[in-house]
Amino acid sequence: MRRALHVLSIALITAGIVILVDVAMTLAWKEPLSTIYGSIQQGAAADELDDLTRRFLDRDDVADTGDQALTPAQAGRRAEELARIFAREVVDGEGIGRIEIPGIGLGTVVVEGTDTATLQKGPGRYPETAFPGEGKTIGIAGHRTTYLAPLRKIDEIEPGDEIVLEMPYGTFRYEVEKHEIVEPSQVEIVDDVGYERLVLTACHPLYSAAQRWAVFARLERIEPATPADA
């Protein structure tokens, strides 16, 4: 009996240490077990994005119109045309592009959708919002403490910072205008506002889903892709 109790006590102490380590790592960085799973899922999303890019740029109706430089207006019209074609190719849950935020050291694949399983792969595009290039609002949500925690540092993004969305049909550069703390019910933050903007959202505060931290950025420049980018 004493031996059994001794073994049990050691097991409980060990389990407690493991839990404390897990909590400490989550507080200091991000949840370790879901991070491993998130890394695997992010790799799968990157492979999906590569396949999607090749398929898209191989389409006859996406063929390059020439090597001439495009004016900003021409680039905008071309991007809008390609975005609408691209939207028909996208499948829920797959990788659709990359987001780069140099100010917080983020570079990761964006996936289509915001359901629970999809956000385990990476930040996801709100399906009710537009695609980059359509001249409307693009909404992207991401985790802050689990599954790679891509938007853990969302509160460190500052006005004037650049956010880049690299899509199979072009690169879109946005400049951060402001941030807001909103309630989960305030879905109007991703409504269209008459110009193209990007809205990033993540739970706030850390370890809570009570509110949302939202970052708003306005489109500054478009660089349409060509088949040579495949």
Image (cartoon, grey):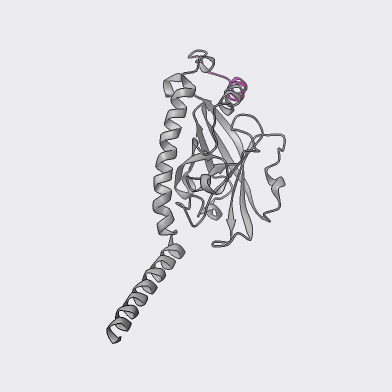
Q: Would residue 30 appear left or right of 2 to someone viewing this image?
A: right
Residue pictured at 43% horizontal, 60% vertical: 29
Majority secondary structure of magenta residues: helix
Query: Which corner quadrant holds the N terminus?
Result: bottom left
Residue extending farthest to the front is: 1
What is the residue that sits farthest to the left in this orientation?
3
Q: Identify which residue, 183 or 13, lies in the foreground.
A: 13
Front position in the image: 85 or 164: 85
Q: Is residue 75 magenta?
A: yes
Q: Position of residue 32 (x, y in %)?
A: 40, 58
Residue at 41 percent of width and 51 percent of height: 37
Query: Percent position (x, y) of residue 103?
Result: 48, 48
Q: Quick check: 227 left or right of 11?
A: right
Identified at 58% across, 26% down, the residue is: 88
Q: Relative to residue 99, is residue 39 drawn left or right?
A: left
Q: Which residues are magenta?
A: 68-80
Image quarter of the C terminus = top left
Pinpoint residue 12: horizontal percent, then vertical percent: 37, 76
